[in-house]
Image (cartoon, helix red, strand yellow):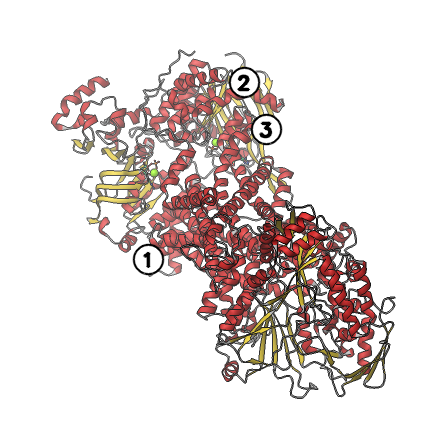
Amino acid sequence: SGGDDKEGNGDKDKDAADKGGSENKTLVFGRGGDSTSLDPSRVTEGETFKVTANLFETLLNFGEQDTTVQPGLAKEYDTSEDGLTYTFQLEEGVKFHDGTDFNAEAVVKNFERWANGDADTFPYYNSMFGGFKDDEDHVIESVKADGESTVIITLKRPQAPFLKNLAMSMFAISSPEAFEKGDDEYERNPVGTGPFKFVEWKPNETITIEKNEEYWQEGLPKLDRVIFQAIPDNSARLNALLSGEIDLADGINPADGAKIEDNDALQLFERPSMNVGYLGLTVTREPFDKKEVRQAMNYAIDKQSIIDSFFEGRAEVAKNAMPSSISGYNDEVEAYAYDPEKAKELLKEAGLEDGFEMELWAMPVPRPYMPDGTKVAEAIQSNLADVGIKAKIVSYEWATYLDKASKGEADAFMLGWTGDNGDADNFLYVLLDEDNIGSNNYTYFKNDETHKLFLEAQTEVDEDKRIELYKQAQEILHEEAPWVPLAHSIPLLGGAKELTGFVPHPTGSDLLSNVEFK
Amino acid sequence: MNKPLLEVEGLKKYFPIRKGLIGKTVGHIKAIDDITFHVNEGETLGIVGESGCGKSTTGRTIMQLLEPTEGVVEFQGKDLTKLSATEIRSVRRDIQMVFQDPYASLNPRHTIGKILEEPLIVHGGGSAKDRRKKVVEFLKIVGLSEYHAKRYPHQFSGGQRQRIGIARALMTNPKLIIADEPVSALDVSIQAQVLNLMQDLQKEFHLTYIFIAHDLGVVRHISDRVAVMYLGKIVEITESEELYANPLHPYTQALLSAVPVPDPNYKKEQIIIEGDMPSPANPPSGCAFHTRCPFKMDVCTKITPVLAEEKTGHSVACHLYTVEGNDDIERKKQLEGSV
Amino acid sequence: MSEFTPKVDGVVEAELEKTTGPWREAWVGFRKSKVAVVGAVIVIFFILLALFGPLVTKEGINEQLMTDRLQPPSSEYWFGTDDFGRDIFSRIIHGARISLSVGFFSVVGSIVVGSFLGIIAGYYGRWIDTIISRIFDIMLAFPSILLAIAIVSVLGPSLRNALIAIAIINVPNFGRLIRSKVLSIKEDEYITAAKAIGMKDFRILFSHILPNSMAPVIVQGTLAIATAILEAAALGFLGLGAEAPYPEWGKMLADSKDYLQNAPWTMIFPGLAIMLTVLGFNLMGDGLRDALDPKMKS
Amino acid sequence: MNERKKLLEVKDLQTTFFTDSGEIPAVDHVDFYVREGEVLGIVGESGCGKSVTSLSIMQLVPSPPGKITGGEILFEGQDLLKKTEKEMREIRGNDVAMIFQEPMTSLNPLFTIGNQMSEAISLHQKKWSKKQIKERATEMLKLVGLPRSEEIMKEYPHQLSGGMRQRVMIAMALVCDPKVLIADEPTTALDVTIQAQILKLMRELNERMNTAILLITHDLGVVAETCERVVVMYSGQVIEEAPTKVIFENPCHPYTRGLIQSVPDMRNKKDRLYSIPGNVPKPGSIEQGCRFAARCESAFSRCRVETPELYRNSENHQTRCFLYDEQQGVTSANEQTTTRS
Amino acid sequence: MFNYTIKRLLQLIPVLLGMTFLVFMLIRAIPGNPAQVILGQQATKEAVEALTIKLGLDQPWYTQYFSYLGGILKGDLGESMRTRLPVADEIWPYLAATLELALFAMIIAVVVGINAGIISAWFQNSWFDYSAMVLALVGVSMPIFWLGLMGQWAFAIELQWLPTTGRENVRDPVSAITNLYIIDTLIQGRFDQLWVVIKHLILPGLALATIPMAIIARMTRSSMLEVMRSDYIRTARAKGQKMFWVVYKHALKNAIIPVLTIIGLQIGLLLGGAILTETIFAWPGIGRYIYDAINFRDYPVIQSGILIVAFIFVMINLIVDLLYGLIDPRIKYD
Ligand SMILES: Nc1ncnc2c1ncn2[C@@H]1O[C@H](COP(=O)(O)OP(=O)(O)OP(=O)(O)O)[C@@H](O)[C@H]1O
Ligand SMILES: Nc1ncnc2c1ncn2[C@@H]1O[C@H](COP(=O)(O)OP(=O)(O)OP(=O)(O)O)[C@@H](O)[C@H]1O
Ligand SMILES: [Mg+2]
Ligand SMILES: [Mg+2]
């Protein structure tokens, strides 16, 4: 492993493994939190998927570093003209970790399990497929097996991102044998078809998975074991990486990026950005009900300087509500420049030439899209002061923060979003449509035009047309300026120099089957 | 002398012994158990007895600092046990106390001036100027000077502190002063100063004293009458001359003989009684002294002797002088021989 | 009767000490203890810093100068700069005001509330004592940092709320201290003496019991300021303390945690500032204890 | 009687406390001796240095702040002050034993009586078996008149009354047959009836075992009843020394006289007690002249300037008063006698 | 003694009841819906509503309180809202981790603290006394997280003597039996692992031990000084006893009671109060567990977690009180 491992001096096996370098087949992956469950369909939280992505497989996969749809457990798939019928050709000879066969029947049983659930058991199924079996908005008409290895899914109405949804980690296929024993039991004893098998879970400490010898893809995985270790504190995690106790660490502070780059024993990984960090302006609150004021805010904030200082340059300046990697991104939108004079002018237009006082809500916790909320808030505060806006920084404990913000209690709040499936809908509609007021549309922004565009795009099967719709919407959003989009950050990971084959995925769940130590 | 200033009758003070979950009372410490005596105006009643026999409790119960379990404390014709809290506070201007430990009884954070002024404030004694004048006056009376008023208790010697304690007791012109071992913390040479002062003040202010002590010499010196206590009871009470010349109770006799006399030539017969005083929580049956008494009779273990006048003005509680005890005449004779 | 001059046997003036009250005496004792004086000097230094420091430092402690980020200590920036390019030296000086006020006001708050409850419990006893004591028990059994976190979570994180939370968690400590002090003083002879001259309960409470129970409270209070500063720093570290951009020391530590390796000065100086201040109060508290409370003397 | 050897001799002993508020010469050039089998009394008022003297002999003066700053303590001719701590340990409890004023606090409350007794024995009888030690302890408890000594061995100090505890202390002190027993106010905290028991016990033990006793007290009555010879201390100094009878019949130092007269006598009531004016000065507070001068009715000019020595006014009687200074004393002694009477 | 214990246990009931009530009201006063937190930022409104109802959070508070209380009385600590596991099953590994760390820290603190205090008192005003007491003061004056981070930096990163985080070498994990790893490794005879486990304990243990150690040292010192002045110490010396035994036998036993009280209180504090240390050293302990539960509004975990910590705290104090009785024969419990 990286660094010279000081512990377990008495342990000969491990010493040998360490010295041999290439013989080390155990990866210790340090991360910020523990998983809440190992049944991906039941949770919404990313730490779980980091593990389950390696235990389970989905019918379709994302691309190695993007969110294009690729074959997965389904080696081929076919969409009907009207976008209502999907046919999947499954891989054959695949077995679950418990030895049962993976086949069309198993897929059907998985879908039935989800469709029969409720919103709190399978929250993602609910939000991605519009509800459950008897719900009106439920998109899926039926899931049927056609022989051993063909599955046909029929929809009630076209859903543009349907295939992308299927590639999401939460719709991984589990062994029906295993989950039929009960949902709660299954959470701690996951059985999938993935390259690794579950071994042990020490809560808040480690989750250990080991090589699935029977894995259907030849030669994979390359590692024998992966241990996910929870180290909540970013600095502590970095320390553990530096001392070689862990081989791979995510959530590296931008500030520490250079240090890892300079370290001969380590290498730095950049995760492709699929997020947005923004300053939301609650449009129902004075004076942010005035477009001029919102635009003025956009002019007043020096995004580049913030990115240079607190993202250490490892982010892209945001001008839209979604990152450029997502199809539908409108690059023609002209970003608001950093122009305090212009901001002042706009304020004057709005009748606020003397500026005003406001609360600026700062995130209390680091998130991939916003490594240090309070510091960015401080920088913004200083920017705003330059144009005469007196911002008082306010912070709440995270859950309270979300709760209060979602109730529209904040003047301006910092927040962000990491995409689930790399679809524009998953950004624009979720975050800025009136349907999501009270939930993820914290700004209470409401616009008939965009609403219409979003709904249309949801069912539009023609990719080019969809892109056009989203581009239009982005123009409007830019003009209306419910947000000050700040940055699309590039989350950093650090790893041992010897590590190869590790490709960070934009969704945050990394498949480790190709990883090995040189 | 005419009407007694203070009459105590059948006074009892039991302290409950609590135990268990809810503090159930499982027994009593009979600190004082049915005592009766009186104090005449202008006299000094000495109370002697060994540690823990109930002397202080007696003093405090009379003052109503402790609520008596039973009995009557009649002061100037008023039964103090029946008064309300406010009434008692006003009675306290007439009954004052001097404490054993002069240091502990003075608030270390108050100046002497403040300490002496306090009783006047409490009992509404005139303007601030008058009060200060009176404080100075009394400081001089007890042999201190005006400038002492600004000082704090720890800056005085033991004897001086006790004078302050006495001055405080005098501030309200009381009639009765209960002095609870006022000199036992003092050295002999200082003790003499304080005793002299107390005697002088008594004459000057027509004070009545209840003087509690365990030193028989001191009690003899200052008292007109003496009560001897043993285990919560008065076992003998009489004029002090009479008591020292002619003690009747075996306990008194033993007590007197135990006091060392500062004269190497004086040879006395020593009656050394064995053992310790029993616990007031669990007093012996019958006469409480029978466990240590050299003249123990059968009757002593069964019947509690009552305090009765044996001679004029000389009461004793002992079966040697009761009808029950008279049976054993020989014993009595033997006793007479030995006295 | 003022004529009366007793034959008080020719009093020879004993060597009386100079007119010194117990407080003055304590002060003299305090001055003699080197440790205490060192503590007091540190504390006074920080108090002066808090009062006048901001007048002499660079203006605009919150002014950001991104071009001067994370500068090491130099003649321009004595303690270097932080990640906003702000002068750490000036911020620490301003932070003194925050830390000292949090320490001081939270402790005063707990003393006031704690004394009130403690006196009532100690003096009146019975059921009211039982109730108050049980409440103290409950609060003491509650892990204090968790309690503080919970309170701050309820009120929302801010300096004022951190102060309130710290005050609340310290209430039972003072309450118990006062209660036990009242219980023991209640038995003192001078209280009996006060009762014997016919003094009312209320007056006894305020004129005798309270002043005499103050010494340990002052000692405990000084030490509690030290703890309160640490607690505030801990809350600041958890992001539950002062709001940005206040230069609260604990928050400064938390903010610079990531720079421990590239810019250690950002962590070392606020840490030292906390340690020194707290040390000052602890030293002073120790000295005060020796001076005010001879029984606890070590 | 005078043939008896001097067993313990204190010569020019000085013990000083170095406190924040200055040096306190608590024991200031003190001389006295104890003969074999003798009971010597030291009397004096509170704070005059009695305890410090006795602790100095044992070398148990709390240090800091106390320190023996000069003099000699000869025990059987050897200077104890020159011994090492280890040698002193051999002597403590073995040759010289001590009991203290407070029976309530002088026993360790957390160990049984038996444990504490056995400790005292085993420290000096290293070869003894457990059984022997226990037998000896029980025997000693019986000797000091404690009934049920077997059971008491197993009890804790708080289960005993004050008198019993003081007996245990005495038993513990005598357990190694010491040659000298130092008793520092052994009965002050006890009631008179108990005091009488304890004093009787001590007299008996002195007679039976011929242990020399240094009895420290402030009670003249106790001295009169118990001691052969008396040393009177005042403010850190010995001011008079003589056989008991002599002291009471012919007290020479004005302080001793005052002391004897100020005790209220139980046998006959005086109208008014004699009282010495003023207070006992703290050692070290009077820098010049005789320490008693300020309170002394016979004081004359020299007393306030010069410091008197111990003057021998008869074969076995010494007094620290200029009235007995041979050189100039006679006249002033006469002068004094006239003023007094 | 037995009765006393029963009495004390009965007295615990109102305290613990009050505790549950306090915690219950307090956490519900924190804004934020647990359902929302559990489901996360990405969740839809319906999902949140469904979960709210399922968790019974729509009920009036008293219904919720009494049903929780009813559960407690039946020995049911509830079920974590987040992980859906019974708290009773889930909590032990966390508790064990904290217990192990806290006990390790306390052993260091007690052994070093008591001895430093004794020696300081014995040689009062010596250089040892001064330096020990100044060190102790510095110890209580340091922000613990600062000390922890500095220690991690110095000993784990720069010197590489000790591991930075965690309880074990995750590459060679201890198979948990009791979850107290020292015991587990001993049972299994894995002495190599035992050494690793101890190495992991050292840094967080020391960080945690600093304050109690300092407090214990100071308390021991002042208690010893007081005892050393007492008459029975003089008696022991007058017997000819060696100073060492006078100090360690006669004085220590008498001086230990206030120290025990402090030790009891400190163990209690460490159990629930080690959040910062647990965070910095990634120690999967109960403080962190409850802290996370606060962030997740996982009511049953907060309630039961705090209840258990409080219960242990009062039990430790009860044990300390009972210990007094063993040490001091004058203390009688009845
Ligand atoms: N407040 C109290 N609660 C319980 N018992 C008490 C209380 N006050 C006194 N006693 C008990 O009552 C008995 C008599 O006590 P008291 O103080 O009156 O004795 P005393 O004769 O004054 O003794 P001393 O000479 O020691 O002052 C003692 O056994 C004592 O233990
Ligand atoms: N530990 C100490 N520190 C400072 N001064 C002390 C100490 N111990 C004794 N002294 C001083 O030494 C003087 C003599 O004290 P000592 O205890 O010998 O008096 P004593 O004659 O035994 O009095 P008592 O009758 O009260 O026991 C006192 O005046 C006291 O001030
Ligand atoms: Mg009394
Ligand atoms: Mg003495």
Indicate yes or no: mark 3 CB to ligand 1 under 8 Å: no
Residue D164 in percent (x, y) is at 43, 43
Name the residue that disc number 2 marks.
B124
Task: Give the amino acid at mark 1.
Answer: Gln
Q: Secondary structure at mark 1?
A: loop
Q: Are marks 1 and 2 on the same chain?
A: no
Tell me if label 1 and label 2 are in contact, CB under 8 Å. Answer: no
Dot 3 amino acid type:
Pro
What is the chain letter for disc 1?
D
In the depicted view, which residue is nearer to us: C130 or A376? A376
Q: Which secondary structure lies at badge 3?
A: loop
Task: Locate the N terminus of chain C and report the quarter of the image it occupies.
Answer: top left
The type of residue carrying mark 2 is: Gly
Q: Which mark is residue E71?
A: none
Q: CA distance from mark 1 to mark 2?
A: 71 Å
Would you name the residue on which mark 1 appears?
D125
Report whether C59 appears left or right of D267: right
Earlier sequence position, callout 3 versus callout 2: 3
Residue at image mark 3: B68
